[in-house]
Image (spheres, grey):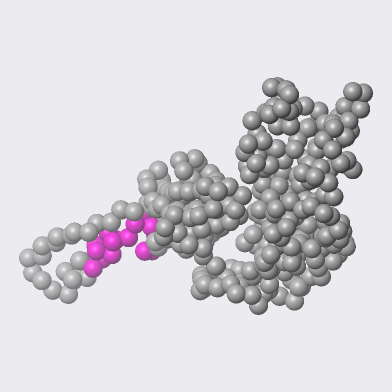
Amino acid sequence: MTYVTKLKLTFLTPGPLACLVFLAVLTIFSCPAGADNGGVIALQYPPDKVVKEFGLLNVSLSVPAGSADRITVRDNDREIITIVPDEKFECFAVPLVLGMNEIRIIAERDGSGVYDTVFHAYLRSDLEARYRTAPEGFRKDYFHDGAYPQCAECHILVPREHDKKPVSPDSFIAERFDKDTVISVTSTCYSCHRKMASYYPYVHGPVAVWSCLSCHEVSSTPKYAVKKPDTDVCFTCHVDQKNNWAGKKVTHGPVTLGNCAICHSPHAAPYPFNLYKATWDLCVNCHAEKGSGKHVLGDSFSTAGHPTRGKADPVKIGKELTCASCHDPHASNYPHLWAFDVDSIFELCRKCHYDK
């Protein structure tokens, strides 16, 4: 932003007219270049050094009429969005990368820069150790606990009666009609968070029908927080899984701890089953030693090892071989979370190599 900070005017005869001229000139030069009527572009949200846990960050920018004709948003030197402003407030979502995001907003008018600001957001993840802890000075911002009166000019910030939808998944199916029209007027969450359900290809059921209060609690502290452990919320709908896994002898670590969201996004994700990563990549993220290519046989009588990807799954026709071809990622009655009814590794091998 360009300001004139020093201004020297000399009047031969001081008087009321001279003072008026001085004030007029000072007013013109104390505004950003190109701004009309003293309008100043300003970042309304988020604050700098904010911590996020979902890969989309909502941004609100105050853009007075005539102050800019082009806005460019960059994240870590990648151009993300170009906007031709036509509203008093320009609100948009910025996709984040894991770890540090340096977001720069540049506004121009008639080819000249009139506003340039930088802020930082840190996308943390329980899944990857190097991104679990944000740098010093970064903190979460609980928007709905804060005071943002400027947002209330356009958005309803408290739930209404029709937001309080039933939890039963059966009700979600009934609501799959004319979503773009109906949901936009029946969900107070939609206007700010609509990008959540369109940016990623796999969307969680409650998000798809904007039944946010099926999981988020109005009376919680901070506001709209979700109960922990995750299973307290997930098993409300996923009753079959709860009953199935409860009777198993062995459960996978995240299931034991009730931490479903370490692997599955509760909102939307780039991979099937709302996984944060493809199955093989997800597994070796924690089980790094299994990603060497020597899993199963490489440490015994064969140096070649057994493939864990890059091959067709011989049992699940049409699927690719992954860790989940042999192991159940949730629970099992058999050693090593085997996905088959077997008691030894040789029995497991014969499930695929039945001619050996």
Residue 105 is situated, as x and y percent measured from the top left of the image, at: 45, 50
The residue drawn where x is 68% and y is 29% is: 299
Residue 243 is situated, as x and y percent measured from the top left of the image, at: 86, 60
Is 60 in front, or is 112? 60
* Image quadrant in which you'd find residue 255: bottom right
Q: Residue furthest right?
A: 355
Residue 300 is situated, as x and y percent measured from the top left of the image, at: 71, 27
- Whether 153 is drawn above or below 318: the answer is below
Is 318 in front, or is 179? 318
Is 125 in front, or is 190? 125
Q: Residue furthest left?
A: 12
The residue drawn where x is 63% and y is 69% is: 225
Q: How many marks?
A: 0
In the rendered structure, the answer to whether residue 222 lies left or right of residue 337 reads: left
- Whether 326 is drawn above or below 152: the answer is above
Asked if residue 240 lies in the magenta stretch, the reply is: no
In the rendered structure, the answer to whether residue 245 lies left or right of residue 44 reads: right
Q: Which part of the image, by quadrant, shows the N terminus?
A: bottom left
Segment colored magenta:
23-38
Asked if residue 26 lies in the magenta stretch, the reply is: yes
Is 58 in front, or is 266? 266
Residue 224 is situated, as x and y percent measured from the top left of the image, at: 64, 70
Q: Which part of the image, by quadrant, shows the C terminus?
A: top right
The residue drawn where x is 65% and y is 77% is: 219
- Whether 316 is drawn above or below 45: the answer is above
* Image quadrant in which you'd find residue 179: bottom right
The residue drawn where x is 67% and y is 36% is: 290
In the rendered structure, the answer to whether residue 330 lies left or right of residue 290 reads: right
* Image quadrant in which you'd find residue 213: bottom right
Judge whether residue 298 can be spotted in this image: yes
Judge whether residue 152 can be spotted in this image: no
